[in-house]
Structure formats: C-alpha cells, structure tokens
C-alpha cells in the first residue's frame, strides 16, 4: 500500500526558512514523479514544485513561478523528496501536500495528509 508522509511544517517569521520532507512507503518510487502542492484557506490547491525521472539517468526539477529563486526541491533518495523553502512570505502560508505520479501517467495518484506552514508578517 502506497503511503506518503510529510513532515517539517510549522510557524516561521517572514524571511525565514523551513524544510519539508516527504517519505514514501510501498513500491519503489525511483521513477515516480514526486511533487509538492499547497492549498491556502479559501483557495484552490496549486502546484509548487516537482521532480521527475528523466531519460533513465537523472532527475529534473520544475518549480512554479511564485517560488522560483526561493524554494528548492530535491530528491534525497528513491523514497524521499524534500522542499527547502527560504525567504518565506506570508502568502506562502498554506497546507503543503506531497504527491506522487507513477511513470507514464499524467495524474498524481497518491497524496500525503498535508503539513501546515504558517508564515507570520
């Protein structure tokens, strides 16, 4: 059974940093695309960053424009992905979700329970 568990959320002041981690269990996730989404109160869930297996040799990262230059996504190993968040802003406040998409599929079939990130001004 696939399971994704996020950790690392919390309260931080604007300009601060946090590191989120997502640990996967179940099948080997080496070739899965793993991503972070977030959902702020009253807003729709939005894409933050993803890292996908490319051409059988390496991982490629993709980040939304709103976090480029401030956030970094990394594939720590086959079963864990992290999101390093720096220069945080109050508008980054949201529940952050880890998600995984099997290779060759365009949809994220697996989701974590979410972790709260609150940035105070």
Image (tube, rainbow, N blue to C red):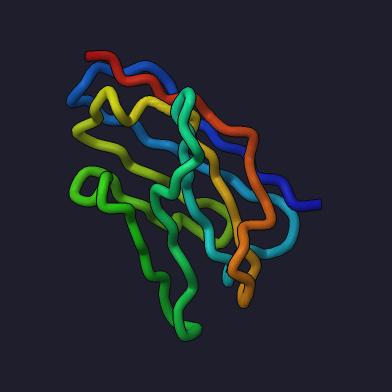
Please provide percent x and percent y for residue 44.
Answer: 49, 37
In the rendered image, the residue lying farthest to the right is: 1
Q: Residue 31, position in %: x, y?
A: 58, 71
In the rendered image, residue 102, in percent from the top left (x then y), is placed at 65, 67
Q: Indicate the position of residue 70 as horizontal and vertical percent values.
A: 22, 43
Residue at horizontal 24 percent and vertical 27 percent from the top: 89
For the point 43% across and 37% down, the residue is 20
Residue 100, above or below 37? below
Residue farthest along the bottom direction in this orientation: 55
The answer to which of 64 and 34 lies nearer the viewer is 64
Residue 10, placed above or below residue 98: above
Instruction: Tell me the quarter of the image containing the C terminus.
Output: top left
Mark count:
0
Q: Residue at x 70, y 50 (%)?
A: 25
Residue visible at 68% across and 52% down in the picture: 110
Is residue 13 found left or right of 55 in the rendered image? Answer: left
- From this view, report whether residue 101 is shown above or below residue 67: below
Q: Residue 84 versus residue 121: which sits nearer the camera?
A: 121
């Amino acid at each position: 059974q696939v399971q994704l568990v996020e950790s690392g959320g919390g309260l931080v002041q604007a300009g601060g940093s946090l590191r989120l981690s997502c640990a996967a269990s179940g099948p080997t996730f080496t070739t899965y695309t793993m991503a972070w989404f977030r959902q702020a109160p009253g807003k729709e869930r939005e894409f933050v960053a993803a890292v996908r297996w490319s051409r059988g040799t390496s991982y490629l990262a993709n980040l939304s424009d709103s976090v480029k230059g401030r956030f970094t996504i990394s594939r720590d190993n086959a079963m864990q992905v992290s999101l390093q968040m720096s220069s945080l802003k109050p508008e980054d406040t949201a529940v952050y979700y880890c998600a995984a998409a099997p290779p060759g599929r365009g949809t994220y079939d697996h989701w974590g329970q979410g972790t709260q990130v609150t940035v105070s001004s």
